[in-house]
Amino acid sequence: MSEHFFNRLEDELNSSRDKYLFREVRLYPECRINLCSNDYFQLRHDPRVIAGAKEACEKFGTGSGASPLLSGFLPCHQSLLDELKKWKQKSYGLLFNAGFLANQAVLKHLPGKNDLVLADKLVHHSMAQALTQGLARFKRYRHLDLDHLQEFLDAHCEEYETIFVVTESVFSMDGDYPDLKKLVELKKHYPFILILDEAHGTGVFGETGAGLAEEMQVQDQVDIIIGTLGKSLASMGAYVLSNSSTVIDFLVNRAGEFIYSTFLSPPQVGSAEIALKILQSAEADRKHLHEMSTNFRKIMKLKEQEETPSPIVPVVIGDPVKTLELRNTLLQQGIMVGAIRPPTVPPQTSRLRISLHTGVTRQTLEELGGILEPWLTP
Ligand SMILES: Cc1ncc(COP(=O)(O)O)c(C=O)c1O
């Protein structure tokens, strides 16, 4: 390989290093408290979920053996899909190997060349990147600003064949969420297809944990729901659900992300199905998680977030160097939190991303608040 090639890569990496934005895969020391995962209900180590993985593995094998349209789609996949459809009240659906791939498939293949996609400014990279690769034009409205969205709808609804509106339910790096009731109200005035990524809402919101759409009673108004099995469902993989069989058939026929990849392994789906059943009746845990989330925001005096009961708590530091230093200080004390820097978040908004879970105690929250306080007081 040419020297020129290596030099180019090294130059780019050095530029990331200089800005303290270099990323590396590393093993972190064993921590007392992990506030860095998306396993909000700590189901990854739950013996019932592990038994679900084992049972599926014993019945169907360690791997699916093939892509889904060959012989990879097995009874365990059908069973999980049926449960997901019931839970999220949709008639048709499809499993994917990852939420990233599901978002790519939906946004690259469904909007066509005469369509417009309106997406929240802070949607996850899996969606943002797909928008740049699809055929449709796209615009980004200000984060959670539905008036801005309405301005775009007003300005463009006549110009395009179909308009898609795309948002996360609970935003992965900010822990906030849109007013979905107000969002679906807009559908009365402007015909658009609503795509909702419930990656972080699933399990956490709704009477049965089906997500923010269930919590806000708008499930029937969401046209396409995407979710991952890798967060509250304690596994990995993803799903796309809709009441339109045409949407699902189109993805089955066009989405290379689905067609050309060895399908989810039986232990992955077996564990997710048990986790789903546990989450459906986890009202007490959900309540505990919400209370803890608002309490922690109070302890941290995060005034503008005080009413937000989601378990993702961003503590915005700004400077990436200080963010890393603070993360390392916490690591030394046995507490692991995420240090999130650009380009994952906008410039000057580097942050600690603290993900709470049902195993966290009030004592932990106070300890963490105590460690962070001197760093945050101006
Ligand atoms: C909002 C959102 N959507 C999609 C994904 C991707 O899901 P997966 O991890 O299953 O690929 C993530 C993962 O971090 C996410 O936060």
Image: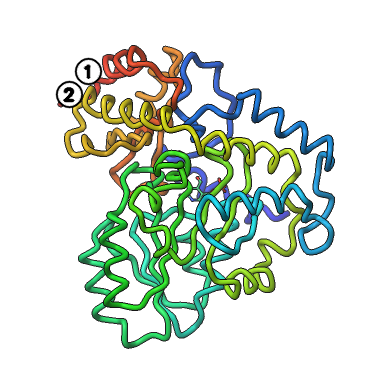
Residue 256, quarter of the rendered image = bottom right
| Residue 147 in view, yes or no | yes
- Say which residue label 2 marks: 377
Residue 364, x across and y down, in percent: 36, 15
User: Depth check: 356 or 50 in front?
Assistant: 50
Residue 310, x across and y down, in percent: 34, 37
> How many numbered dots are placed on residues in this image?
2
Residue 363, x across and y down, in percent: 33, 12
Residue 251 placement, left or right of 357: right
Inter-mark Cα distance, 2 to 1:
6 Å
Establish if 261 lies above or below 273: below
Q: Which secondary structure, mark 2?
A: loop
Establish if 111 lies above or below 98: below
The crowding category of the residue bearing disc 2, from other C-alpha atoms within 10 Å (few below 14, some 14 to 19, many at least 20), is: few
Residue 99 placement, left or right of 324: right
Task: Give the residue displayed 22% in from the left and 66% down from the top.
Answer: 148
Residue 374, numbered circle: 1
Which three-letter amino acid code belongs to the residue tagged 1? Answer: Pro
Q: Which secondary structure, mark 1?
A: helix
Task: Give the residue displayed 83% in from the left and 43% down from the top.
Answer: 60
Establish if 169 lies above or below 341: below
Task: Give the residue displayed 38% in from the left and 68% down from the top.
Answer: 165
